[in-house]
Structures are given as structure tokens and as C-alpha cells.
Amino acid sequence: MIKIAPSLLSANFVRLEEEINNIQKAGADIIHLDVMDGHFVPNLTFGLPIIKQIKDIAKIPIDVHLMVSNPDVYLETLGKWNIDYVSFHQEVENHIHRQLKVLQKYGVKAGVALNPATPVETIFPVITDLDFVLIMSVNPGFGGQSFIPLVYDKIEKLRKLADQVNPELEIEIDGGVNNINAPKLINKGANILVAGSYIFGSANYKKQIQSLRNK
């Protein structure tokens, strides 16, 4: 099943509850939240209080992507709140296995995120412990960036290994996703597509979501 996850990074923050309601009505499967700390990436976004409020009103799963230097500060809290998906970056975490277990003890789907230049092979040692992998197809920090095609090979490599040792592994793609590249991303093995400006930059959220899912 292909899941579409609109990224609230591109939503109108002044009308956030309305935007959430609109994407849910439009057929979104997941709400994607990019948490940025101004250190790991040069931007600031959602903090824990806003995440909690979004979780309280959401009717579909929440996906929290931690673009932060210290993900361990967030994990216990996100787990206790029953956030559905949580990922942190391989580039900042020295104890990946330990942090995955913190999330999974609460029933959270635990994932590792990879920047475009980070080889997918770096997470092969923990692939059997992962629920999903988030592959960045832009450099993290800002919405509206252009898609980086090198991720196609990364998806294919990851899917081939996962099919052998962890076939339930989900592969999520974030950055520059649109109706042009969505078919190839799905063909290579991705099943969660994060889209921000492609959806929120349109007057018809439902049409944009369907255009990603139906290709």
C-alpha cells in the first residue's frame, strides 16, 4: 500500500488546524512533522508542545522526523505520547540500536533517516531492527527544494536487502516528491511518499494526493 504523507513544513502555520483537517479530508494517510533545532539543520520548526497538540487533534497517524543534534532528548516523550512513526538521523546518533529500542518499547514504528550524501549501507548493520527508513531526497532544512535523483539507487539497494532480511521494512522518501518522480520511487521500492509544497502549494489537496498515489 502506498501511503501519502503531507509535510506540514509547507502548510500555513497560522491556519494549522484547518490545514490538518483539509489534508485528512483530502485522503492523506500520514501527517509528517519535521522537527528542526537550528543546529543539525539551519532552521527551526515544531517543538514538543505543538507536536502534542497536533497529535491530540489528528485522526490519522503522525510521523515525526527529528532533524536534531540530540534526538535522545525527544524519544521517551514521543513514545509516551504514542506517536506513530519517529525517525532520527544516522549522522548524529552513535547508539542507533539503543534508541530504536526506546521507541519500540512504546509500540512506536522506529526509523533512521539518511541525508542524500550518506550511503545506505551505513544502516545495514541495524536493518533487522528497523521498522522504516527515511531517505532524504533533498538536503534537510527547508521545504521546496529540488529532488536529487541519486536516491533511486539507494532505494533499490535498501529494498533488495530488506526483502531478504526484513521484508516488512517500510521505505519513506522526503524531498521534492511530485507526480513526475513518484512512479519511479514506488517502482524502486518506496511505499511512503512525503510531499510538502507539491500538496500545500496547490488549491486542490485531494487532486495532488491522488496524483501521487495513482501513478
Image: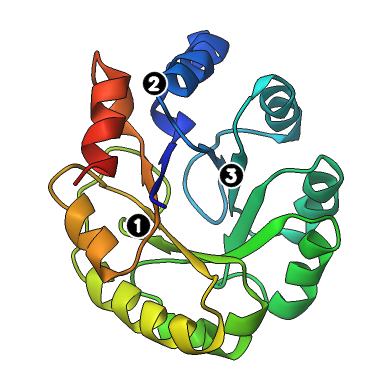
Residue 53 percent across, percent down from the top left? 72, 22
Give the residue drawn at x 52%, y 87%. 124
Q: Which residue is mark 2?
A: 26
Name the residue nearer the viewer: 206 or 138. Answer: 206
Dot 2 or dot 3, earlier in sequence: 2
What residue is shown with label 3? 63
Colour convention of the picture: rainbow
Circle 3 Cα neighbour tier, 10 Å, few/some/many (<14 / 14–19 / ≥20): many
The kind of residue tagged 2 is Ala
SS class, disc 1: loop
Residue at 68% over, 19% down: 57
Label disc, if present, on residue 114 of the rendered structure: none
Residue 80 position in % (x across, y down) = 87, 45
Dot 2 and dot 3 residues touching (CB under 8 Å): no
How much space separates mark 3 and mark 1, taking CA atoms?
19 Å
Which residue sits at x=18%, y=65%? 149
Q: Earlier in the sequence, mark 3 or mark 1?
A: 3
Identify the disc placed on residue 139.
1
Residue name at image x 65 percent, y 53 percent: 86
Label 3 sits on what residue type?
Asp
